[in-house]
Image: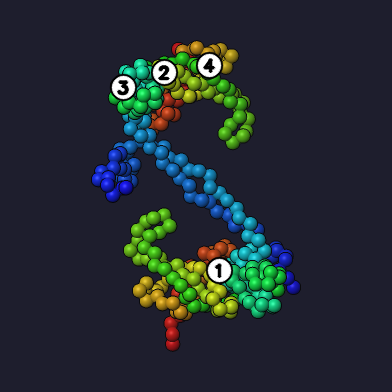
Amino acid sequence: MTAKIKEFPGISLNEQDFTDGKILFNFDKLNGLYAWDTGIGIGSYLASLKNGVILGSHCRTCRKVVVPPRTICEWCFRPMDEFVPLKDTGVVNTFSLCYVTWDVQRIKDPEIPAVINIDGASPMHGIMHMLGEVDPQGVKIGMRVQAVWKPANERQGSINDILYFKPIKEK
Amino acid sequence: MTLLKRNPNAPVTWQGELPVRNRYTYGLAGEKFFRTLKDEGRILGTHCPHCDVTYVPATIFCERCLAKLDEWVDVGTSGEVNTYTFLHVNLDGSSREKPEIIAFVRFADGGLIHRVGEINPDQLEIGMIVQAVFKPTVERIGSILDIDYFKPV
């Protein structure tokens, strides 16, 4: 349908037209504040991130360690038994090279989100985070990575207390 | 041990803000209407010769016969109070000492909703002629609030 239309009616605008005052407009900022209950598991997870520890939880029946920690086991539906501190190292499970940011800006150096299987958790259990200090073309599935933390006094109990994961240099 | 107790040191909520911003452009007729309001302090309408209706604020199409309108008319800065209301509560819910007067001011076959000022609330009547009081030219931004309020003639 759109292939048949050579020229679309209307006036196209770019950012310059707004800053130069070529077009009148009304700007509005809607109230988008929210508060999301962390629950017991994620609350403890965020609190321990502040202390520089990635926390998981363990089910004795299924012998599973999941991360982020959950309070109920997904396999046996029993309450999980204990929180376990995990290492801040892991293995790249999967990754992507993003040349477009969340607000649709094109970038030259890609952001590299990845799922990282955390050491100490059950196989194929990990968290999603960013990779850094790495050549985008050199990222491989199975690569060993380590968390780079914010300085302790800047941490605020957020997943962003880990800045990114960087490759561990093999000796 | 089961994990049924909250860690007292753990955050209870995760808080954030969704960045919701918008820009509304006024369209072809709106652009000319607000541009004239801003630069010249005049209120424009468009006239449909087929239906003999003058739209205020200006529209680019006649909503009765859907014809394109290009006959622009200056409707002056005085209109008639068609209806009004007193606002005793602010936008945030707090109560106002002096009520704000909001009126529908009729121009030609349309009109503008705006504030009425410089008047004792008891003296306001339907049918009263009120005139637009504009902000100083430098303060105008191309918004309906470039008219500060309407005052009785």
- Report in which chain the residue with disc 3 lies: B
Q: Are marks 1 and 4 in contact (CB under 8 Å)?
A: no
**Residue B107 vertical placement versus A106 (above, below):** above
Reading the image, the residue beneath label 1 is A152
**Residue A69 vertical placement versus B38 (above, below):** below
Mark 3 Cα within 10 Å, few/some/many (few <14, many 20+)?
some
- Give the mark nearer the N terminus: 3 vs 4: 3
Q: Residue furthest left?
A: A6
Can you tell which quarter of the image residue B24 is in?
Answer: top left
Residues beneath discs 3 and 4 located on the same chain: yes
Q: Name the amino acid, label 2.
A: Asp
Q: Are marks 3 and 4 in contact (CB under 8 Å)?
A: no
Give the alpha-carbon distance from disc 3 to disc 2, as whole Å: 14 Å
- Report in which chain the residue with disc 1 lies: A
Q: Name the amino acid, label 3.
A: Trp
Q: Specify the label residue B109 is tagged with.
A: 2
Question: Which residue is pictured at 41% across the width and 73% down the height?
Answer: A133
Give the alpha-carbon distance from disc 1 to disc 4, as whole Å: 62 Å
Can you tell which quarter of the image residue A46 is in?
Answer: bottom right
| Spot occupied by residue B136 in the image (x, y as percentages of width and height) | 39, 26
Can you tell which quarter of the image residue B2 is in?
Answer: bottom right
Q: Name the amino acid, label 1.
A: Ala
Give the alpha-carbon distance from disc 3 to disc 1, as whole Å: 66 Å
Reading the image, the residue beneath label 3 is B72
- Give the mark nearer the N terminus: 4 vs 2: 2
Q: Nearer the viewer, mark 3 or mark 1?
A: 3
Question: Which residue is pictured at 56% across the width and 63% down the height?
Answer: A158
| Spot occupied by residue B22 in the image (x, y as percentages of width and height) | 44, 43
